[in-house]
Amino acid sequence: MKKPKAIKTVSEEIAKAAPRTLSKSSVELTAEEMAILEIEVAWLHWRSDFRRAVVASGQLRTPWRNIFEADAILSLIAHRWLTKAPITLKEIATYLSEFSTEATISRHIDDMEFAGMLEKIKDPADNRRLLLIPTERLLIVGRNFLQAKIMFMKNKGFIPDPIDSN
């Protein structure tokens, strides 16, 4: 198996790369890199199927505008809630500010609230802030997604190694 190269500063590596079409024979990925790429493609398929099912069920007023944004928002909400630090719309907008506006994030959140994936609750410490809290529906969706991803990763030879929080 090919040994992975040291990770360079991304911008330096991108700046040095030629903007020409690659030939398949010029690309060599390690088995791990190929597995990760396959995981990403499987994730896109799974999310696309999930999105179609949610839209067909009528749970959304409008289809989520961008799957990447929707996934990022739902992941941030779930992670922050699980780590006992619920997140606000403003914080999500800050995380995603490089590629999305606060108005777009707000529309996503409105759609997700309408779909029953999250609730907006006043922050007891500051009534001006709304905390975004996941619902049971999001828990079920998230757990199914995580279990599918774990199974796929195990089938590709990855062994989950949870972070020890102690």
Image (cartoon, grey):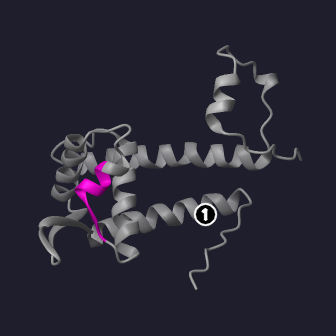
Residue at x 26% of width, y 39% of height: 101
Q: How many marks?
A: 1
**In terms of secondary structure, what is the magenta stretch mainly?**
helix
Question: Which range is magenta?
Answer: 86-93
Which residue is nearer to you in this view: 124 or 43?
Answer: 124
Let me know if residue 154 appears in the view.
yes
Vertical side of 165 occupied by 143: above or below: above
Vertical side of 9 occupied by 54: above or below: below
Q: Inspect the magenta stretch and tell me whether residue 153 lies in it.
A: no
Task: Give left or right: position of 60 versus 143.
Answer: left
Image position, residue 13 (x, y; %): 69, 31
Task: Give left or right: position of 27 versus 114.
Answer: right
Residue at x 23% of width, y 56% of height: 89
Q: Quadrant of the C terminus?
A: bottom right
Residue 87 picture quarter: bottom left
User: Residue under circle 1?
Assistant: 151
